[in-house]
Image: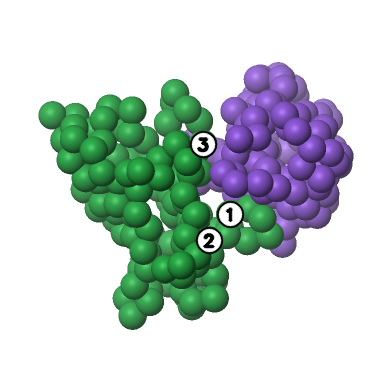
Amino acid sequence: QVQLQESGPRLVKPSETLSLTCTVSGGSISRYNWAWIRQSAGKGLEWIGRFYSSDNTIYNPSLTSRVTLSVDTSQSQFSLKLTSVTAADTAVYFCARERSGGFDPWGQGILVTVSS
Amino acid sequence: EIVMTQSPATLSLSPGERATLSCRASESISNNLVWYQQHPGQAPRLLIYDASTRAVGIPARFSGSGSGTDFTLTISSLQSEDFAVYYCQQYNKWPRTFGQGTKVEI
């Protein structure tokens, strides 16, 4: 059974870069689409983007200028980088596998706070 | 982007009662809709995809219907573990978008 686990800094300063990693266990990272989704009290659930390969990545237009997704198949990990963060980027960040149009499974989520 | 609107915001019901949750899309999304359940402090769990197909392991008391712009999630007889927040999400177009959720409370 595939399991996902997010990791990374839980506190990021304004204007800096948020970097998170999702480790996939119990299954192959290849042949699937992988996504990042965040959840905040103010904006609810927000889809950030989807990675399948370096030339098959789609980002939310609201974030596309600041976000980069990548995959390291050798480590069974996929990553999120979000630059120039502000307090509005404070949220619980989830990684998930794309499946049947939705997302399943999800990681447990990691709360990232943007604050000086 | 497609805006997903859920109603009501909160549904107050008792165990054993029937719950009917609505989700409306700002434009037609065919049947490209999923439903999730989320308990506090947990990640969402996929319940229904293609508007009406239950995901593996989801009890038969959960059912989905609708197409186009109007969708419904029905829980036929609420169990204690069903009290949670439910979200719809469209996958007809990019970016994927979610509704704001319906809280089913006791």
Question: Contact (CB < 8 A) between labels 2 and 1?
Answer: yes
Q: Are marks 2 and 3 on the same chain?
A: yes
Q: How is the image coloured?
A: by chain
Task: Using the numbered discs, state the Cα–Cα distance from disc 2 to disc 1 in whole angstroms.
Answer: 5 Å
Q: Earlier in the sequence, mark 1 or mark 3?
A: 3
Vertical arrangement, residue A8 with respect to residue A90, above or below: below
Task: Using the numbered discs, state the Cα–Cα distance from disc 2 to disc 3 in whole angstroms.
Answer: 16 Å
Instruction: Pinpoint residue A81: horizontal percent, then vertical percent.
Output: 30, 51
Residue at 82% over, 32% down: B70
Instruction: Pinpoint residue B82: horizontal percent, then vertical percent.
Output: 68, 38
The chain letter corresponding to green is: A
Which quadrant of the structure image shows residue A104? bottom right
Image-based side of A39 in relation to B4, left or right: left
Could one spot residue B57 in this view of the protein?
Answer: no
Vertical arrangement, residue B70 with respect to residue A61, above or below: above
Residue designated by label 2: A97
Q: Chain of mark 1?
A: A
Image-based side of B48 in relation to B83, left or right: right
Q: Amino acid at mark 1?
A: Phe
Residue designated by label 1: A103
Crowding around mark 3 (Cα neighbors within 10 Å: few <14, some 14 to 19, many 20+) is many
Residue at 46% over, 67% down: A55
Q: Chain of mark 3?
A: A
Crowding around mark 1 (Cα neighbors within 10 Å: few <14, some 14 to 19, many 20+) is many
Q: Quadrant of the C terminus of chain A?
A: top left
Q: Earlier in the sequence, mark 2 or mark 3?
A: 3
Which quadrant of the structure image shows residue B3? top right
Task: Using the numbered discs, state the Cα–Cα distance from disc 1 to disc 3 in whole angstroms.
Answer: 12 Å
Residue designated by label 3: A45
Chain B pictured colour? purple
